[in-house]
Amino acid sequence: MSKLEVKNLHVAVVDEDKGQQKEILKGVNLTMQTGEIHAIMGPNGTGKSTLSQAIMGNPAYKVTEGAVLLDGKSLLDMPVDERARAGLFLAMQYPAEIAGVTNVEFMRAAINARRTDDDQIPVLEFMKFLDKNLDILDMTDDMVERYLNEGFSGGEKKRNEILQLMMIQPKFAILDEIDSGLDIDALKVVSKGVNSMRGPEFGSLIITHYQRLLNYIVPDTVHVMMGGRIVESGGPELAEKLEAEGYAGVRDDLGLDVKLTDEI
């Protein structure tokens, strides 16, 4: 069993217009283990995506205080590729398109990057595993021969991210708004892929605005994030409360002095 810990995390980004740093995360605390699915919900501008980028090591996000630990080892001095090899995976809200590199080449290289030189995955084993996962996601063989995300629709990109997740088999996956732009059928397929990963060797942190996704991927824990902090945690029923009351209602119940982005 592995553990991912975020302790008193403060993160800033550079405000190019003002030429100064702007603090986004203001003391986030979160602990999860493999075998668990956690969801983070919160209004726009509260720092959900910033948290995902900081955990993964995007250099545009500066950690000014706190710690991120994987199995007790600090990740903060590791570049992105080392964090990935250590067992982290980020499914991005807007996956990049990479011409000249096919999906199948990318996935095999990513798998082998986490293995030793004398233990590279055999081609037949890789293809058998790929066929199994393509079937789960209702994806055709020709999609893996296309260049990475090039010319893909939004829904195809999201399926492709989940296919990569299923092939790479990380310890922890951070899924940043994988439900964004998906119709109900695509949402069900993507959820099926994530649920197929559930087990004692896998944990996931799901970032979403809407309770709808959590009808299909039922989390063990739901966290509410506002003003750069996690302000409340609970079970799946907390997502239902958010759906019924909205973020303003939960904020007022907690007596927080937080202005929501969409408020006038």
Image (cartoon, rainbow, N blue to C red):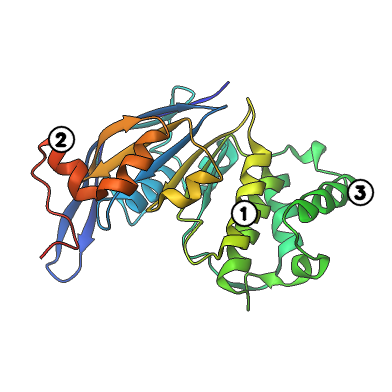
Residue 78 located left or right of residue 149 = left
Q: Residue at x 62, y 61 (%)?
A: 186
Q: Is residue 66 visible?
A: no
Q: Secondary structure at mark 1?
A: helix
**Left or right of residue 224, residue 166 in this image:** right
User: SS at mark 2?
Assistant: helix
Q: Amino acid at mark 2?
A: Leu
Find residue 188 and name its label.
1
Q: Is residue 87 left or right of residue 59?
A: right
Quarter of the figure with the C terminus? bottom left
Q: Position of residue 254 (x, y in %)?
A: 15, 35
Determine the image quadrant of residue 27: top left
Q: Is residue 28 left or right of residue 3?
A: left
Q: Position of residue 76 (x, y in %)?
A: 38, 38
CB of mark 1 within 8 Å of CB of mark 3? no
Mark positioned earlier in the residue sequence (2 or 1): 1
Q: Residue at x 39, y 50 (%)?
A: 53
- Residue 72 sits in quarter: top left
Residue 124 numbered mark, or none: 3
Q: Cα distance, mark 1 to mark 3?
A: 29 Å
Residue at 40 percent across and 38 percent down: it is: 77
| Kind of residue at badge 1 | Lys
Q: Secondary structure at mark 3?
A: helix
